[in-house]
Image (spheres, rainbow, N blue to C red):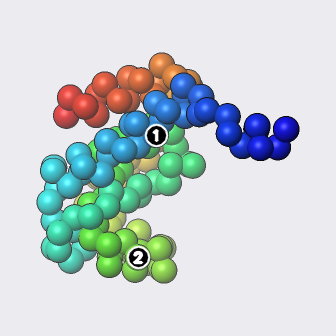
Amino acid sequence: MYNETMRRKKSELQKLRDKADALLTPLIKHLFPRCLLCGGETEVAHHHVHKSKSLVLRYNPDNLIPLCGKCHFKLHQNESYWASKIVEIRGMDWWMNLRKAGEVVVKGDKYYFARACEILSNL
């Protein structure tokens, strides 16, 4: 029974969420080819407000920070310092707008993730 549970197929919601997530980094690499912190080549899209903290900001390009692998690693070693540097670079207006946008509550159902896939595919 345990093996059967482990082998279950992903739900439609999980598949849609994974598809939307997979669209993020290529999009950010295209829109912002340079790392925000060092100017190197963008390798990852870092969520300034963590995905677990705000579903509505999960796919918001303003919440996605273009970083090279080295800067992304450094950020996670001292997140509070680098988060403040990002706000310094992007500005307080950006931060306040992001915080306000993050106050919206959305239902993370398959329709939400399907819409996110559609929007991200067309950017």
Amino acid beneath label 1: Asp
Q: Position of residue 49 (x, y in %)?
A: 46, 54
Label 1 – label 2 distance at C-alpha: 23 Å
With 17 as the anchor, is 84 left or right in this view?
left
Q: Position of residue 27 (x, y in %)?
A: 23, 46
106 and 114: which one is in front?
A: 114
Which residue is at a point 20% across and 55% down the rendered structure image? 29
Which residue is at a point 56% across and 48% down the rendered structure image? 53
Label placed on residue 73? 2
- Position of residue 41 relative to residue 120, above or below, is below
Label placed on residue 18? 1
Q: Position of residue 15 (x, y in %)?
A: 49, 33
Q: Quadrant of residue 68?
A: bottom left
Quarter that holds the N terminus:
top right
**Residues at discs 1 and 2 in contact (Cβ within 8 Å):** no
Is residue 92 among what the camera can see? Answer: no
With 21 as the anchor, is 32 left or right in this view?
left
Does dot 2 land on a helix, a strand or a loop? Answer: helix
Which residue is at a point 16% across and 73% down the rendered structure image? 39
With 63 as the anchor, is 36 left or right in this view?
left
Which callout, 1 or 2, points to the residue nearer the camera? 1
Is residue 102 among what the camera can see? Answer: yes
Amino acid beneath label 2: Phe
Badge 2: residue crowd in 10 Å (few <14, some 14–19, many ≥20): few
Does dot 1 land on a helix, a strand or a loop? Answer: helix
Q: Position of residue 102 (x, y in %)?
A: 46, 41
Quarter that holds the C terminus:
top left
Badge 1: residue crowd in 10 Å (few <14, some 14–19, many ≥20): some
**Total marks placed:** 2
Label placed on residue 88? none
Task: Tell me which numbered mark, 1 or 2, is placed earlier along the sequence.
Answer: 1
- Position of residue 91 relative to residue 62, above or below, is below
